[in-house]
Image (cartoon, coloured by chain):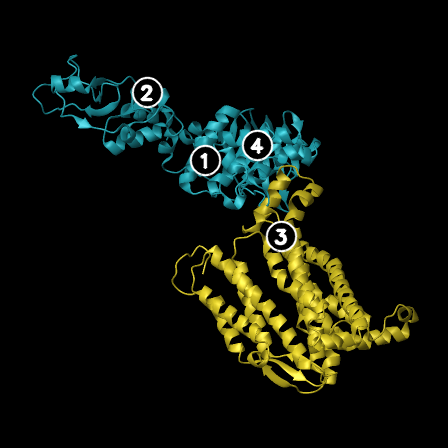
Amino acid sequence: MIEFRDVVKRYGEQLAVDHVSFSIPEGEVCVLIGPSGCGKTTSLKLVNRMLEPSGGEILLNERSVASISPDELRRGIGYVIQSVGLFPHMNVAENVGIVPRLLKWERARRERRTDELLDLIGLEPQLYREKYPAQLSGGEAQRIGVARALAADPPVLLMDEPFGAVDPLNREVLQLEFAALQRKLQKTVVFVTHDLDEAIRLGDTIVIMKDGSIVQHGVPEDILANPADEFVRRFVGTDRALKRLACFEVSEYMQTANTVTRHEAEQRGREPNGDGRIHPVLWVTDDDNALVGMLEPDPDHASRLAYRPYVALHPEEVGVQPPSSLREALSRILGQGLRAAPVVDERGTVLGEVRLSDIEELNQKGIVR
Amino acid sequence: MSSSDNGRGAPEKTTLFAAVLGAAALFRPLYAFKENRVALGDPVTLFAAGVPWGAAFIAALLVAAALLAFGAQRPPIRWAKIVTGLALVIALVATLGVAGRLAVHGEEFGRVTPSSGFWLVLLAGFIIVQGSLRGADAPEALKVLVGLVPFVVVVGLLLTGRLDSLAPVQEYYNRESRFASELGAHVRLAGAAVSGATVLGVPLGVFAYRRRKAERPVFALINGIQTIPSLALFGLMIAPLAFLSREFPVLRSLGIRGIGNAPALIALTLYALLPIVRNAYTSLAVIRGSVVDAGKGMGMSRGQMLRYIEIPIAVPIILSGIRVSTVQAVGNTAVAALIGAGGLGAFVFQGLGQGAPDLVVMGVIPIVLLSVFVDRGLAIVIRVLTPKGLKEAPL
């Protein structure tokens, strides 16, 4: 656990960090976010004593970091920076194994650990062990930066805009990978960023800072629903309602879907399910239960129970998977002009659906004007 | 002209140029025959030198080189060019030796001076060998060995007396005992200057990097020194050192005088400073802030930073500075002979004074060879010490 107690950092007259207090429970990711110069990076650097506070103290598992020698403290804290800072004269294995080397692990153990970490971050050890930083892409270098920080299995990670220098497409991949990694490793993480979407995606809690002070501290969905003041309201943007949807998982809002097989749809024509009720949308599946199309009610038809003709669909275009966010679900719904999005697994099997009406309801409940 | 270019299109220009140069040079005088060391000499071409088999062989090699230049750029052809070039150099020197011996036969003070034809064909041979060796796909050690072949052969010819008729060789025999001591003096002077410049320059470069305010004055001073012509700098040393020597007998007893070793050493050291200071500065400047941050952030102590990061990255760059300095110092030391410091330059200035160009050549050749060997030797040391990740990559 990390606790900031009334921490102050002064540069001459200027207060870079102004009486900041908050704590991060073990195993959680706390994202520090705010405009440049708000004190987020300064706060992060106070944790591993890259900077020393002018007042207050920082506790790491109830022990003041000031009481631990900087080098010893840092060897127990993983540190990832935006520019990665891989050592150009060392290959990937040497880079990843550097902290264990500082900790005087024996060679065999170091090598085992290096391979394990490369596997963990999804880079084939045989292929990457001997490569030099200059031979890596930006995304690969950044992954190795993370692996290096994890090498000695520190309980705490400090990440200073780690994905900031990577192009947007790769950034998203890295974020998702890191989120998956964190679910497995349960580190206590201080994560600095200026990218709100990244904060929402990765943060268990978010600390919004401005001029050295905390303006709001809370879980992402609360901050987006109830901005504490005008500054936060502007910071999270007019699309905060949309952003907030990224905090919710599809699996939690999934409803039972009404399906009918293609075979049945063809046989029974425009009233395929014949249960006497009409559904806002009827998903059509093949014999393996995979999504192939849909039927929508036809209000103009004489029979109140009739559907419009069959529309073919591709599951990868309209479907969302259970771990996706409601934001993605909404974008599928709007993109296809539907009332709901089908929830599918990798093979396209229909698991359920997310309805537009549920999203609207959730939105109205949460957002306070 | 890359080695992967297997097409038979355009001829390979370097070899073709060298072959044409060599062919044209065949019609220039190979050597000049002199009755004594100050005589002007009669020019003699290769074809008139009385060694028909040598002339034919050399001409054939040049034709072969020209034909090979039109071949595809594949390893066998590349190596054929290298062998042709080596054979050309060796055949040329051997032919000159035989021709010289024929020419001076029975003449007590007779000697032959290599002329433009000899030097140009020699140059052509070196261009063919080095041009093809450079891009060859072979271990570095093998390339070095191949490059050494002509030196070894020429030294063999010299030691067995086969080149005795050559005027520079005769000049050498006349000064055999002094040659070793002047060579020693040259090496000592250049070595001491570079050592001194390293001891002074590396800390100065580090200082200039660490103290941003010192950077400008340090480089202004060192660049300034470099702009003073070497002759003038040697001259400038004379007056103050003569004064000090007169005023302080202690200094005089240490051998410090207005002329001789002391002023030469000081001037040479000052000249050697620039590349060393500059590279020491650069060696630290290339280490990115993020690399230092990462090292510090993972808990490296100051000593570990030095050992794991700064030294491995900086040492090869510092050594490159020392290499440039050393090559310069070997050349500059020749000028130091003017103020009585000795060294191989003494022969050069003596030769100039006596109007004996062969003596000048006798002094210049070892200076050139010394530079080349020091340069190549240090290049190998640097290559060995450069971490693999930095060899081809930008920092």
Above or below: residue A33 compared with residue B3? above
Residue B128: image tag = none
Marks 3 and 4 sit apart, C-alpha to C-alpha, by 28 Å
B356 or A282: nearer the viewer:
B356
Chain B visual colour? yellow
Chain A visual colour? cyan
* Residue linked to disc 3: B383
Number of residues whose C-alpha sits closer than 10 Å to that of mark 1, classed few (under 14), some (14–19) or many (20 or more): many
Q: Secondary structure at mark 1?
A: helix
Marks 2 and 1 sit apart, C-alpha to C-alpha, by 27 Å
Q: Secondary structure at mark 2?
A: loop
Asked if the residue at tag 2 contacts the one at tag 3, i.e. Cβ–Cβ closer than 8 Å, the answer is no
Residue type, numbered disc 4: Thr
Marks 4 and 1 sit apart, C-alpha to C-alpha, by 20 Å
* Residue linked to disc 4: A114
Residue extending furthest left?
A302
Whether residue A144 sits left or right of residue B287 in the image: it is left
Q: Position of residue A176 (x, y in %)?
A: 43, 31
* Residue linked to disc 1: A174
Q: Secondary structure at mark 3?
A: helix
Marks 1 and 3 sit apart, C-alpha to C-alpha, by 37 Å
* Residue linked to disc 2: A254
Q: Chain of mark 3?
A: B
Asked if the residue at tag 1 contacts the one at tag 2, i.e. Cβ–Cβ closer than 8 Å, the answer is no
Q: Chain of mark 4?
A: A
Give the mark, 2 or 1, whose residue is nearer the N terminus: 1
